[in-house]
Amino acid sequence: MEMGVHLPLIEFGSEGLSLRRLQTVVDAARESGFGAISANDHFVFSKPWLDGPTALAAVIERSGEMTLATTISLASLRGPVPLAKTLAALDVLSGGRLVAGVGPGSSKRDYDALDVSFDDRWKRFDEAVMIVRALLRNEPVAAHTHHFPLPDAPLAPGPRRAGGIPLWIGSWGSPAGLRRVARLGDGWLASGYNTTPERFASARQALGVELAGHGRRAEEFPNGLVTMWTWITDNRADRDRVLREVLSPLLKRDPGQLAAQVCVGSPDHCVELLSRYAEAGCQRVYLWPIDDEARQLELAGEIAPGMH
């Protein structure tokens, strides 16, 4: 199982948001043997949130050969033409290293901020992905659309990667979501704090059935696990503080439930959790250190040498 890292887009306390902080994380990930860096997407949030695509663009030069990923971009809200333009630029500037994770997003606040109906998110998403895929592959787009306008010219410049940018679909693992992944996606992104290794394995099996129905081979369909909150510590009180005072208010989840689902705690706990995901067939997990990112990535590299 390969390791990736989320860029530090959230300001939890007084650590601040800066280019230097982003660069420090990318340097630490590269030096620790991580395979990818990624950025999530929100327009409004309970804490200050740096724009994801902009952050990815800012660290391309320091990213070496690592994959760049959006995990996810809000296709239903950014709109297919602006999003395709952004994704193509990231791919060109990185020399063809982008994987585009897309989803509708689960926060109603993002929709309210753009005066878009949250109830329409799935219809908008399906149409947006269809258009983004066509633009990134220079293919014909459907003549009629319901939610988004279409350009009257091809996307230029197009992506650097031959065949277009892979589009991975975010889904927490519901039957409807997995059907959408099989129908629209080039890969599947699950959410670390919304699943378990056992549920991931079950969803992966169900996804294989859906893929077969589309004439696709599950063995050739990649997956990843995103937003794996990480704080490696041998101090039990420190672990409890992070779960209770940082993650529980942020995610509106019970600290006890989160304790079993995220890499917050002892090295043994984190190794055991990540090993179970590897056994469940997870191919890449994106860690999100809560603070002191460089040290946390160094610790992750030490405890899971066979996973990156």
Image (cartoon, rainbow, N blue to C red):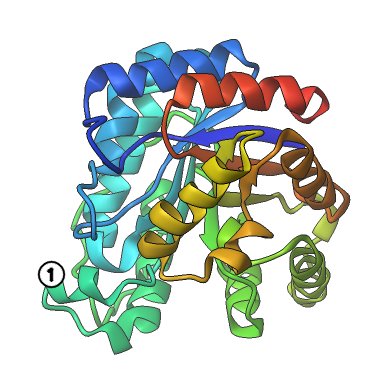
241 with respect to 175 (left or right): left
User: Eyeballing the image, is 141 above or below 138?
Assistant: below
Q: Which residue corresponds to the image point at 66% horizontal and 69% vertical from the top-left?
A: 182
Q: Which residue corresponds to the image point at 32% horizontal and 77% vertical from the top-left?
A: 124
Q: Quadrant of the N terminus?
A: top right
Outermost residue, right side:
279
Outermost residue, bottom side:
119
User: Eyeballing the image, is 2 above or below 44?
Assistant: above
Q: What SS does tag 1 mark?
A: helix
Q: Which residue corresponds to the image point at 64% horizontal and 73% vertical from the top-left?
A: 173
The residue nearer to you, when weighing 216 against 77, is 77
Do we see residue 155 in this rendering?
A: no
Q: Position of residue 195 (x, y in %)?
A: 65, 66
Q: Which residue corresponds to the image point at 75% horizontal and 76% vertical from the top-left?
A: 210
Task: Count the marks.
Answer: 1
Q: Quadrant of the C terminus?
A: top right
Residue identified by numbered label 1: 113
Amino acid residing under circle 1: Ala
Do we see residue 276 in this rendering?
A: yes
Q: Position of residue 140 (x, y in %)?
A: 39, 61
The residue nearer to you, when weighing 14 against 27, is 14
